[in-house]
Amino acid sequence: MDYEPINKIPVEKMKVRPNLTREAELVAGFDWVSLEKELQLEESVNYNLAYAAIDRHLKNQPDKVAMIWEGKSGEQEKYSFKDLALLTNKFANVLLGLGVKKGDRIFIFMARLPELYVAFFGGLKIGAVVGPLFSAFGPDPVRDRLADSGASLFITTPDLKARVEHIFKELPALKNIIIVNKNNRHPGSLGKDEISYETAMEKASPQLGKMASGKENHSIIHYTSGTTGKPKGAVHAHNALIQHYATGKWALDLHEDDIYWCTADPGWVTGTSYGMSAPWTNGVTQLVYEGGYKASMWYSLIEKYRVTVWYTAPTAIRMLMKAGEKIPAEHDLSTLRHICSVGEPLNPEAVVWGQRVFNQAIHDNWWQTETGAILIANYAFMSVRPGSMGRPTPGITPEIVDDTFNELPPGQEGNLAVRPGWPAMFRTYWNNKELYESRFKNGWYITGDRAKKDKDGYFWFIGRTDDVINTAGHLVGPFEVESALLEHPAVAEAGVIGKPDPLAMEVVKAFVALKDGFTPSDEIRRELMQFCRKKLAAASAPREIEFIDKLPKTRSGKIMRRLLKAKELGLPTGDTSTLEDD
Ligand code: PRX
């Protein structure tokens, strides 16, 4: 079914920023340097995300609430910009005291607690490269990330430490472990040689000497999955902040009096770029909720905190749609004036549903871990074409190119590519310059997505060009799951694909051949699922396992996931000339 464009938000609902009422003006009035001046950033003085997001506000609005935190048991805490500035100074001093230096990699493994935010920005202040990790991770993804990056410091809570501590001995570069446990909220104890966050913070000075500064200094590392091998560490630079600031205005339409809620976890790039950097560089109050998805809870939070701008994801929206329209009707959601979504294709039905339930279209936008910031968006002021990702943000030149990396005319499907050089672009993959360079062809950054552009410049997502699975907005590399399965004594071979799913877009499905002496059974199936959940994370573990005698492989021994996918979908298998003989 084709959907008519949904008209822009009624003007009376939208606070129009005078120079942003029309796209042409928006593009004409923009350049990165003037934005840097707006934030009073100077290369060797204060060009640091922590300054732009936190300390910058000490001058004009030190007491403004930066973060409203609600814990999963209903606890509530509020932090002003001044509170955050002092706490992050203290944590920076804790790190300096431990000998952490500029460029050292430090990882944070905890739920969305205030301490996660303090550790993150404290680390940035001294120039450390910070890697927040999704708290649902099992030991394998944590070990892989710390090992690959040679991390020297790890910050966690005792309960999460217990889940992964057996990997520490495999990490020779790891020098310090800091344990956060405010009010003994988390079960578990402080191990020998581990540092108590609370004790160290109590002793630390709230005064910090000079903050590390420089737009090209590395800031954040986020591991992202590819088709082959383990996830790769996309490394970002402090320069990204300027684009977070700008897209926070342009795509999220943030204004100073907004209450903003980004539902993404900082373990993923959305949770750092738009759950930390964009709102705070814009001086906006944001809600951080420790708990997970629950329809009634989410609507209650919007009502309770009078959320005005909401950034979420298609799977969550589909879950809300499934929960029905009775629950939102029981809440006063009238404060909401702009809703955005990212991470997976947003179905046209969801956009139309948003219009009905929230009286406004849900605004899709597109970007990736590697792009660091929103590059394509439906602006608040523009007509939404349901199903489209929107149009390029200022300063960004995306195009559709063919397989020889030449531009295609509007209407034709091809590879989504972007002219490199935007501020938030990743600077490298950690320890893998070769792979980084392979992402650039013929003067384009090749995104790995297939898309098309219509004659009016709107981009439409078609799919990925690789085997990476997108489950509920989380990219899962099939190789990682296959490797985990192969570690189980019963598994001879495993091939993993994304199986289409109405809610999560795709779920992880594994085809498994068992070793001689093992017979397929529901019990082994359950055991394998459990095994992967423990090692990886629930989100990356197979939701379905099908036993087969032998996996289709090329003559060189590579699993042909394409054939497994065709089998799953009941489609023709296409070219099988490279398939190994029986
Ligand atoms: O395939 C695209 C999909 O998610 C990928 C990026 O995932 P990740 O690196 O984890 O970044 C998450 C931060 C956005 C893309 O290559 N994707 C992202 N946004 C959309 C999307 N697919 C369709 N529509 C979108 N709006």
Image (cartoon, rainbow, N blue to C red):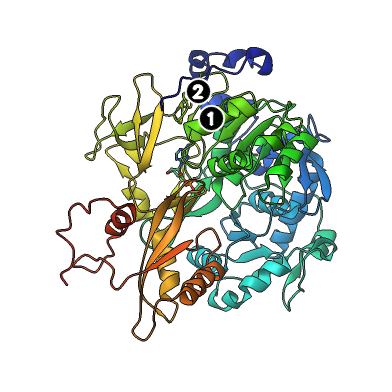
Residue sitting nearer the eye, 478 or 110:
478
Left or right: 58 with respect to 501? Answer: right
The image shows residue 312 at horizontal and vertical percentages of 60, 39
Q: Disc 2 marks which amino acid?
A: Val
On the question of residue 431 being in view, the answer is no
The image shows residue 21 at horizontal and vertical percentages of 57, 14
Q: Residue at x 80, y 37 (%)?
A: 304
Q: Residue at x 68, y 40 (%)?
A: 51
At label 2, counting other C-alpha atoms closer than 10 Å, the crowd grade (few under 14, some 14-19, many 20 or more) is many
Image height of 581 relative to 92, above or below: below
Image height of 521 relative to 196, above or below: below
* Element class at badge 2: loop
What residue is pinned by disc 1? 351
Q: CA distance from mark 1 to mark 2?
A: 9 Å
The image shows residue 69 at horizontal and vertical percentages of 77, 46
Image height of 178 relative to 368, above or below: below
N-term-proximal mark, 1 vs 2: 1
Q: Are marks 1 and 2 in contact (CB under 8 Å)?
A: yes
What residue is pinned by disc 2? 384
Residue sitting nearer the eye, 192 or 336:
336
Left or right: 191 with respect to 345? Answer: right
On the question of residue 74 being in view, the answer is yes
Q: Residue at x 28, y 68 (%)?
A: 551
